């Protein structure tokens, strides 16, 4: 069978159909409220609401598997008391409904100590895993070479958004899905020897946690984005396609750059910026 990838409408979640039905969510960042508290922002734990959201996704999709695409926990390098409580509770709740596959992200150091003793919860390698004919990795590392043979490579890590700015400087930011292709030569330069190349389409999943913020892809260049696929320029960024959570196709990154704040920066603001930069370099 050919895998079918279907974003859930108005949700940062992905349904994948092949032999099994999988539900994919990314960047859950349990425990972020603890970090915000120590930054002076007091928000009560949102764990109950997050479990309810996933239950709604499960009711809609009826998955055999739930794939967590990295950054299940938030705090690094330490683990907060909030995560010690919430991560096992969250994982056990999901495992009541389906097999849970964890692809660890850069925030997930030590998560193996938080995973409950449950045969329906599997922790995979940080470089990703092939699950039911689709390749998954978080994005903070190069994917395992075996993942390059499939038609789809699904990642997260960058919390993709687009930011649209009008002539008066008003901005609108929306979470987005990104679809992109890879440069085989650049990818190959980072792997020794021969490998199977499926010319995979890269799918970048938006963040599940609404408190995480995001990166505006139409205001970013390769070096602004996270992970070696971007810093190596292996992603064809300008031709990448952007979709809103409601399914609206917004065009390519190249076309959307005309609506970025850089487009509407006035000459007077440029002069002020240059003056500030000159002052900042004075001894």
Image: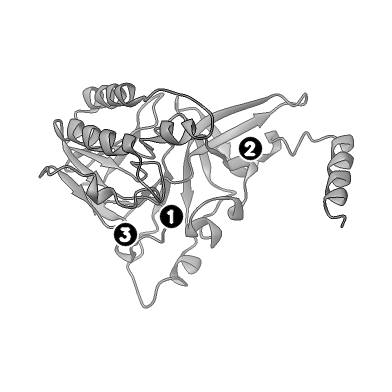
Q: Quadrant of residue 15?
A: top left
Residue bearing mark 1? 140
Q: How far apart are the alpha carbons under marks 3 and 1?
A: 15 Å
Q: Quadrant of residue 148?
A: bottom left
Residue 198, horizontal then vertical, whole percent: 35, 60
Seen in the picture, residue 131 relative to 257 is either above or below; the reply is below
Nearest the viewer among 38 and 223 is 38
Of the image marks 3 and 1, the number of the one nearer the N terminus: 1
Specify how the rendered protein is coloured. Answer: one colour
Q: Earlier in the sequence, mark 1 or mark 2?
A: 1
Residue in view at x 62 percent, y 46 percent: 220
Q: Tell me the element at label 1.
A: loop
Say the numbered circle drawn on residue 256. Answer: 2
Of the numbered discs 2 and 3, the one sitting upstream in the chain is: 3
Locate residue 36, reporting x and y percent: 48, 32
* x, y percent for residue 279: 87, 49
**What residue appears at the point 54 percent right and 63 percent down from the top-left corner?**
232
Q: Going by the picture, which residue comes out furthest to the left?
A: 119
> Is residue 269 found left or right of 26 in the rendered image?
right
In this rendering, would 260 be left or right of 190?
right
Above or below residue 77? Residue 142 is below
Residue 133 visible in the picture: no
Pointer 3 residue: 147
The quadrant in which the C terminus is found is: bottom right
């Amino acid at each position: 069978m050919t895998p079918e990838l279907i974003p859930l409408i108005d949700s940062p979640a992905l349904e994948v159909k092949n032999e099994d039905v999988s539900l994919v969510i990314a960047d859950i960042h349990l425990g972020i409220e603890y970090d915000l508290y120590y930054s002076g922002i007091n928000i009560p734990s949102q764990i109950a609401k997050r479990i309810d959201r996933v239950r709604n996704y499960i009711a809609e999709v009826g998955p055999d598997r739930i794939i967590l695409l990295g950054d299940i926990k938030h705090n690094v390098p330490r683990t907060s008391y909030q995560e010690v409580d919430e991560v096992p509770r969250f994982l056990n709740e999901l495992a009541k409904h389906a097999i849970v596959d964890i692809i660890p992200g850069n925030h997930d150091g030590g998560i193996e100590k938080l995973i409950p003793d449950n045969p329906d919860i599997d922790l995979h390698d940080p470089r990703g895993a092939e699950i039911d004919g689709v390749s998954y990795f978080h994005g903070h590392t190069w994917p395992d070479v075996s993942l390059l043979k499939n038609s789809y490579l699904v990642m997260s890590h960058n919390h993709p958004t687009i930011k649209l700015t009008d002539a008066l400087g008003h901005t609108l930011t929306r979470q987005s899905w990104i679809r992109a292709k890879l440069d085989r030569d650049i990818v190959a330069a980072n792997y020794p020897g021969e490998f199977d190349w499926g010319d995979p389409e890269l799918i970048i999943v938006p963040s599940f946690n609404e408190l995480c913020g995001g990166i505006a892809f139409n205001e970013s260049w390769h070096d602004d984005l996270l992970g070696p696929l971007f810093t190596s320029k292996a992603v064809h960024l300008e031709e990448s396609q952007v979709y809103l959570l409601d399914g609206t196709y917004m065009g390519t990154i190249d076309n959307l750059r005309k609506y970025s704040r850089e487009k509407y920066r006035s000459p007077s603001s440029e002069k002020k910026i240059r003056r500030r930069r000159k002052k900042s370099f004075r001894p």
